[in-house]
Amino acid sequence: MPVERWRAGKARNLFQFLVLNRGHVVPRERLYEVLWPDSDTDRSTSLKVAAHALRQILGSCPGGTGVEIVYQDVGYLLRCAEICVDAEEFEAAVDAAREAERTGDTGGALAAHHRAISLYQGDFLNGETADWVDEQRQWTRAMVLRSLHHLRADAMLRDDPRAVVTWCRRILSVDPYQEEAYQNLLVVHGMLGELGQVRSWYDLCVQRLRDGLDVGPTGRTRQIRDLALTGRLRGRRASAPRPASPRRPAARGLQPLSLTA
């Protein structure tokens, strides 16, 4: 039964948290903090009500679910025979990419990063507002951005401008304030002579940085825009990114494409 169709909000939230911690007893005090962080009500009774509602929901599924919630020691435990959690598969892919990078397995790292990106379907538990959800959501965004940066760097090394555009757009769909991604787009479209795209991406960069962060683009971004719009990037090539610079915390990550003749 899809979680989003459940009526009991706290039962749904309890299930979500127990799934991520399945196989482990989650203490009641931790569940109080997660589900009722600022409540003055009797949280012990509220937890019992949510657990009862969850048992009813799981028991009402046709053919059963193979999932059971039990009270054990001083907390709750979720038992399940077989369950697939995309967030855990995503984390496993990220870990595999890190290990491949550590051992110098370039092909394995690329494959693992591609898998991580394929598993990322948007914000973690989109629509939920709990603190623990937001913490997991921010971590997931950071990890998928790391994979996207890796694939963008690979496209730059291979001088594949269309792939660079694809990965930059994916980066901006996760974090619209990554200024170096706009810089990459300006360079690539300038190289291809697509000056309308240069103007459009620059204007979007200006708007997003202004509205979201109350800052303007760096001088480097303006310089790339001017080079692109005057045709001085056409025929150049995209090379590997330079090391990251700490100029602006909001724009950390791979630096813009270097320009080489």
Image (cartoon, rainbow, N blue to C red):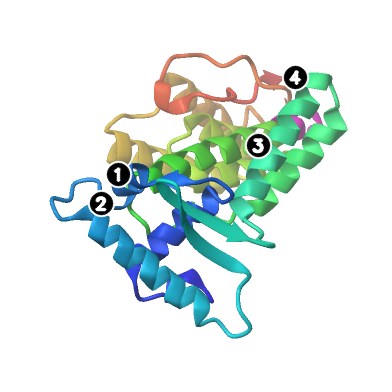
Amino acid type shown at disc 4: Ala
* Residue of label 2: 36
Quadrant including the N terminus: bottom right
Q: Magenta region: which residues?
A: 153-160
Front label number (4 vs 2)? 2
Which image quadrant is residue 14 in? bottom left
> Which one is in front, 122 or 251?
122
Question: Which numbered tag is attached to residue 33?
Answer: 1
Image coordinates of residue 186 in percent, x first then y, are 57, 36
Instruction: Look at 37% across and 57% down and name the residue there.
Output: 128
* Residue of label 3: 147
Image coordinates of residue 59 in percent, x first then y, are 51, 78
Q: What secondary structure is found at the residue carrying circle 3?
A: helix
Q: What secondary structure is found at the residue carrying circle 1?
A: helix
* Residue of label 4: 261
Which comes before the other along the chain, label 4 or label 3? 3
Marks 2 and 3, how far apart in space? Answer: 34 Å
Front label number (4 vs 3)? 3
Residue 153 sits above or below residue 161 on the image: above
Front label number (1 vs 4)? 1
